Amino acid sequence: MTTESTSVLVDIRKYDGTLSARWTATRLGEDGYGVWLGTPRGVSVDSAKGGRTSRYAYVMLVPRGEWWTATFCADPGPEMYCDVCTVPEWDADGTVLRTVDLDLDVVRPRGGEAHVEDEDEFAEHRVRYGYPDGVVDKARQACDWLMEAGRREGDGVEPFTSVYRHWLGLIG
């Protein structure tokens, strides 16, 4: 596990290239699961719906070669919020992260069980943006895997059960 502290622009787009969300996070480090980014409470977030500030601190796991990212939030935010997306890509110096949001989200509320959100948005955007069948298949596979992996402690797998707590502890 390595720790570091550099600024990263997180740039998430919709399939047609329009903005989904954009904010600046801190690269906390890297382990066997991927790169961990931290965002304290109160950071400005630009989105298609306008600007806002983050309501709670969170860490984001950017795995290598996977069709998802995972966010783990401080209380009172959801314990786990996974975005199904295209494989995240880094610029050459590791200061910009880009991915395309594919709408499906796997959310585990604090004390609750994981569930899928935005199936309707996925169905609508699949038609509107013309998601290729291969993209649809990868998105569905990632969503199914996240539902299994993100089960409550004891039933899920790392890093969804406890590993994220170390990283979240680094930003308070």
Image (cartoon, rainbow, N blue to C red):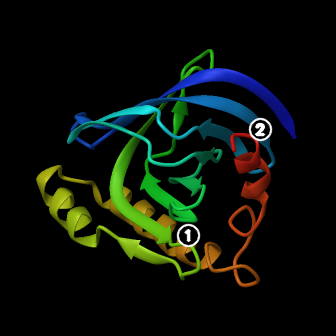
Quarter that holds the N terminus: top right
Return the residue nearer the eye: 59 or 57. Answer: 57
Amino acid beneath label 1: Leu
Q: Quadrant of residue 112?
A: bottom right
Q: In this view, does 129 lie above or below 50?
A: below
Task: Give neighbour class at mark 2: few <14, some 14-19, many 20+ (Cα, 10 Å).
Answer: some
- Indicate the position of residue 129 as horizontal and vertical percent values: 17, 49
Task: Give neighbour class at mark 1: few <14, some 14-19, many 20+ (Cα, 10 Å).
Answer: many
Return the residue at label 1.
146
Q: Which tag, 2 or 1, sits closer to the chain's start?
A: 2
The disc at residue 165 is none
Return the residue nearer the eye: 136 or 70. Answer: 70
Q: What element carries label 2?
A: strand
Return the residue nearer the eye: 55 or 131. Answer: 55
Q: Is mark 1 on a helix, strand or loop?
A: helix
Numbered circles on residues, count: 2
Image side of residue 158 versus residue 8, left or right: right
> Residue lying furthest left in this view?
128
- Indicate the position of residue 159 as horizontal and vertical percent values: 73, 61
Q: Residue at x 58, y 65 (%)?
A: 79
Q: Residue at x 36, y 56 (%)?
A: 135
- Indicate the position of residue 19 as horizontal and vertical percent values: 27, 34
Amino acid beneath label 2: Glu
Return the residue at label 2.
30
Q: Determine the CA span between mark 2 and mark 1.
A: 20 Å
Is label 2 in contact with label 1 (beta carbons under 8 Å)?
Answer: no
Q: In which quarter of the image is residue 119?
A: bottom left
- Indicate the position of residue 66 as horizontal and vertical percent values: 57, 52
Q: Which residue is drawn at 27% across and 54% down?
A: 132
Q: Residue at x 14, y 59 (%)?
A: 127
Quarter that holds the C terminus: top right
